Image (tube, helix red, strand yellow):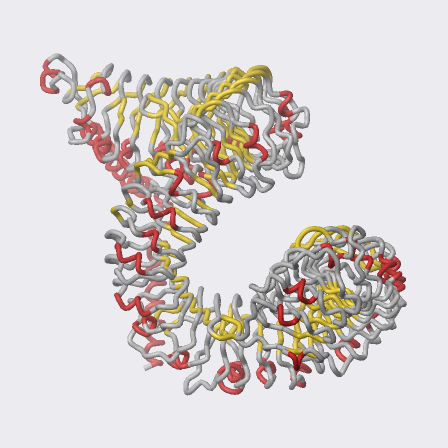
Amino acid sequence: MEDLEESSHLSLEICQIYMGGLYVLQDDNLQWLAGLFNLEHLDMTSVNLRGANNWAQVINTIPSLVEEHLSYCQLDRISPLMETNLSSLTVLDLSHNGISFLPRWYLVLVRYPWNLTSLQFSHLPQNILNGSLPLTILDLSTLVLLDLSKNEILSGQLTDNLGYFQNVEQRNLGSNSISGPIPSNIGVLSFLETMLLGDNQINGTLPPSLGKLFRVKELDISRNMMEGIVTQSQFENLTNIRYLKAPGNSLTLEVDPSWVSLAQFLYLDLSYWKLGPQFPNWLRLQKEINFLDLSSTGISGAIPPWLWNMSTAFDYLDLSHNQLSGGISNICCINKVHLSSNQFSRLNPSLLNLKQLRFLDLSLNDFEGVPIPSFIGSLKSLEYLNLSYTGFSGIIPPQLGNLWIFSLGTLVSLDLGQNNCQVPWPEGPWNLTSLQVLNLNQNQLGGSLPRELLYLNKLVSLDLSKNEINDLMPTASSNLTNLLHLDISDNQLNSSIPNWLYKSKHIKLLNLARNWLQGVILEDIANLSSIVELDLTANQLTGTIPKQIGNPCDHENNQLSGQLTDNLGQFQNLEQLNLGSNSISGPIPSNIGLLSSLETLLLGDNKLNGTLPASLGKFSKLKELDISRNMMEGIVTQSQLENLTNIRSMKAPGNSLTLEVDSRWVSPAQFQHLDLSSWKLGPQFPNWLRLQKKIYHLDLSFTGISGAIPSWLWNLSAEFDYLDLSHNQLSGSISDICCINEVHLSSNQFSGQLPHTTAHRVFTLDLSNNSFSGGLSHFLCRGAGVNKERGIQVLDLGENLLSGAIPDCWMNLPMLVFISLSNNNLSGSIPMSIGYLTSLLSLHLRNNSLSGDIPSSLENCTELITIDVAGNKLGGKLPTWLGPSLSKLRILILRSNKFHGELAPGLCHLSSLRVLDVSNNDFVGVIPSCFNNFTSMATEGNVSLRYNEITYYYDGYPERAQLATKRNEYDYHGTVLYLICSIDLASNNFSGKIPDELINLLGLISLNLSGNQLNGMIPRNIGQMGQLESLDLSRNHLSGSIPSSISKLSSLGFLNLSNNNLSGEIPSSTQMQTFGASSFAGNQLCGRPLTVNCSSSSTDGVTAITEESAEAVADYWLYVFIGLGFVVGFWGVCFTLILKRSWRYAYFQFVDEAWDWLQLQACHLSAKFMLKG
């Protein structure tokens, strides 16, 4: 140590050499430095000083120290000192440590006025400093370089006292959390050459004084929150600037069209600025530029020719995500070109000269279905080519085939995805020695994979999804030794999983979903030791789950059965496991908690039983858990949930689990999606949710909770999107519903007036089946948070105690698609303003006391699919416009009102109609024969309707209807309603016969014509209505016999023909014998199930005329009249010829001439044949 006492330089730098994760040199006590009074330069970079707690005190004893480097020393704090003796210190480098705060001696606080004002270079980047920027650093007036970058949590605003830093040349505060604007007096830093403020939270615009920084060479304000106008005056004096990095802000540049920048940029990035619509002409004199990024700047039109020849050093150009159009004529001397997401429509063959081009991205343009130009195949230096989403189609040209199959040994990445190209797999060896990424998804490949593809040994990623490939060559060998990502989903693979895939031991992502793969999963799947995600969803795989299935996998929507193996616990690297939508039974293994790396566990839609195992609480990394719709039951405690601190999504509805937690417990997890529907959580509202700040989907329906909704629920999260508390015993009033898009509170015990919806974000509001009372005016007409552009779309207020008139202010809710006010006490007429709802699909006003006519303005609601106004006092005639204007109607329910007159002929325009109910009104006239225009009812098993249109109108909200059938009313909704097809004309005054056209509606499930004045016979071909389940023709004046074809209605479960004038024998069949005597009462019928015997009825003078005898009589008279007609016609001609000589001569003359003509034609034809012979 005596030899070191006179040393002025000491370096112990280790250059970051590590041994087993430890630093090579470590020193826990620096007391040996205390006597080095002459030391000026000390460099201990990468020496482990974590245990040296006295390092600051020791260094403070070296007054001659000028330069000190302690980077990468694992320091986590700077010890406090009462005074310092570092008056000569010029450079202090503490970068790349774990320092979280600066002590007072470093900040030269006034309270401790130590002399540190000679400091010129302060390096503190990549620490973990937090809190606000220290104001006392201002005393360091000699500072030339200040680097506090990449501390990430350093906050506060930039100080206005910049005059203290007039000597600063470099200032780096990037990658922190600094907020506020750039100080307006930034221009006083006259010596500033480098200012790096990127990746912060700075707002405001660039201050005008920026133009005074004439020495600045590098300016970085990337990825902040700046906005506003920037003018040329702020740039025209920055003549020395070379690097301007400013992407990720919302700044707008406004310059004179004739202005040209005098600065010669090397690097310019203004992406996300607003520069357009004109191309920035002020760049035309740039001669040294190397990097130019003007993406997402709103520029349009053609690219000016001068751009391609700006600089011989031009290496990178990005003009993507703009509205540039026209052709691409010349790309000269640029190595990397991004032109994606524009409106280019053609390529110029002059691109053939681009021998140096290495990177070309033309994706997301529209080349209007033309083939890929063949000259692209001559770009010999290409390493990256992206032509995805370009609208190219047809066969890939042979030259391009040579590009990526033979010639381009330098090609690393090729993307032709999302086109409509046909790829001719070339024969012979493939020489793609450098290819790593190949994307051909969503084209028209077809057929089998070429064997040569399996020998591209550098291939890392291969995407062949959404083609028509049917063969993976299950028995072939493979040399894809570096393959990490393979996606062959959405094809037509119909073999077993190929053997060569089981040998891909390095693969991390394998997607074979939505194919027709068959057979079992082999135990060889254990070879996929590196896999992170395996997706076999929606195939036809069978058998049990292999015990070796240990790595992240997705076997959803297969036919796998059996139980989860206890061997799962050995796969501690497992990150994702998806076995949803299978037939897996049994409990979740008790040792599943051993999967310590598990992040995703999806077991929904199986047959799992038991409860959640206690070891679930060990999933500290779990982010997503889905056990939806299983058969689980039992107790779940807070100990199983309190360690799941990283969980974000928990989907567990459809089980019978009970959650028991301490009343004071609060969940430490921040859920985004939480669905515990059908769990037992009550009776108290789950208070453990009160600190959720990120939740957007919460479903606690059917959970037995009661009492009032706590006020904190409405303000849980700014991202709250979905809330379902339906089917509970919640009570009290609701004053306001704020900030939630979709709210379901149906089937509770809420009371009082309807709540205000003060937020513009409420799109779906379901308050049905409660006890809300009062009127609707305050809700609909006084704003109530209504937004005419993004207002409520689904509104269900049915089954409450609402009263009064429906207010005439529906124009406040123009976005509505679904309305239900059914089962209330509303009165008055349907308001005319309903016509403003031009997007309306479903209107439910059932069971109120509404009166008046159907408003004419409803004609404007041309998108209507459902109208249900049953159980009111509406009257008048059906409007003639109902059919032509509302031609999309599928459900029309007018039952139990006071409508009268005939059914309007316009009704027959409703070709999509599936439910028609006009029963219990005063309609008269005949049943229109044009009912056969209801083509949606005419086909058996009609499934032509799109499922979503009839079942769900908005965001999963189900359509519903109450239909009368089999003398009862039933509620139908969702899928079941989609299958219903019925006509109910009961209890009116229709007369005449049952039209045959009605019987041609073969898709009808229910037909009710009872309680009318219909006469005539039951149509003979009624048996062809094979879908019919309910038929009611009672209380009419129908006569004749029951058609024997009625026995063919094998689906018929309800039949009522009572109280008519029917006679004869009841057709005997197994089906007819299932109906009781009441179905046939009040007629003159005989046979089972009636007690009247058909033979005995004839002895009593009752003539039993069967359908067959009636038909025989009709046929007899038909033959009689045909015979009489022949006899009369024949003898009428003969008698005329006998009695009238002139007619007789004319007749025989005609016969002679006809005979002569026939002979002449025969001779002529014979001569022609002889000549041909």
Quadrant showing the N terminus: bottom right
Describe residue 342's horizontal placement relative to residue 653 as left or right: right
Q: Residue at x 29, y 59 (%)?
A: 541
Please state the horizontal and vertical placement of residue 44, each as a whole percent of the image: 63, 73
Q: Compared to 845, does 538 lie above or below?
A: below
Front-most of 865 and 209? 209
Front-most of 300 and 1020? 300
Front-most of 977 and 1147? 977
Describe residue 920's horizontal placement relative to residue 877 as left or right: left
Residue 488: quadrant of the picture? bottom left
Q: Residue at x 49, y 21 (%)?
A: 731
Q: Is residue 550 visible?
A: yes
Please state the horizontal and vertical placement of residue 994, each as a whole percent of the image: 36, 27
Q: Compared to 71, does 1108 lie above or below?
A: above
Quadrant showing the C terminus: bottom left
Q: Compared to 878, does 353 lie above or below?
A: below
Please state the horizontal and vertical placement of residue 861, each as a whole percent of the image: 59, 34
Describe residue 794's horizontal placement relative to residue 183 as left or right: left
Q: Is residue 827 visible?
A: no
Residue 965: quadrant of the picture? top left
Please state the horizontal and vertical placement of residue 781, each as a whole percent of the image: 66, 24
Q: Compared to 610, does 128 lie above or below?
A: below
Front-most of 524 and 284? 524
